[in-house]
Image (tube, helix red, strand yellow):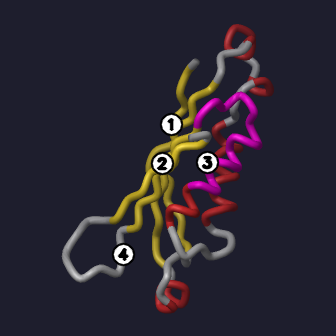
Amino acid sequence: MYTIRLKNCSFFARHGVLDEEEKLGQRFYLDAELDVQVTDALAQDAIAATVDYGEAFLVIEEIVTGRRRLLIEALALEVAKTLCERFPQITCARVTVRKPGAPVRGVLDYVEVTVAWPQ
């Protein structure tokens, strides 16, 4: 097994519980850690038989910039599940979503959740 990490992917989206979050939108940051089953792709240097991380990024982008989710947990789970469906070589996807502009009463850098699939 080997691991592919996509770190600090950045997208503008409109997720959140409050109406203002949908109206204004904000930047979201995402990390994906993908455990991948070793196949002949490595020995053969064949991109078609492994996880193309460029394609994985596009899958993530489509989900994050798509329809609004109230919970960043739900967003992370959908990304993890979709990556596992799209790339059957992935044995586990851990997805972290960071929301720097979380509407909380207090000072913080960001709120972050991590979801793993399958669990």
Q: Which residue sits at x=50%, y=53%?
A: 9
Q: Cα distance, mark 1 to mark 4? A: 24 Å
| Amino acid type, mark 4 | Gly
- Give the camera-side residue of 77 and 108: 77
Circles 2 and 1 in contact, beta carbons < 8 Å:
yes
Disc 2 marks which residue?
31
Query: In the picture provided, is 14 more to the left or to the right than 85?
Result: left
Which residue is tagged 3? 80
Q: Are there few (<14), some (14-19), or many (20+) residues within 10 Å of tag 1? A: some
Whether tag 4 and tag 3 are in contact, CB under 8 A, the answer is no
Q: Nearer the viewer, mark 4 or mark 3?
A: 3
Q: Amino acid at mark 3?
A: Ala
Q: Secondary structure at mark 2?
A: strand
Q: Earlier in the sequence, mark 2 or mark 4?
A: 2
Earlier-in-chain disc, 4 versus 3:
3
Q: CA distance from mark 3 to mark 2?
A: 11 Å
Q: Amino acid at mark 2?
A: Asp
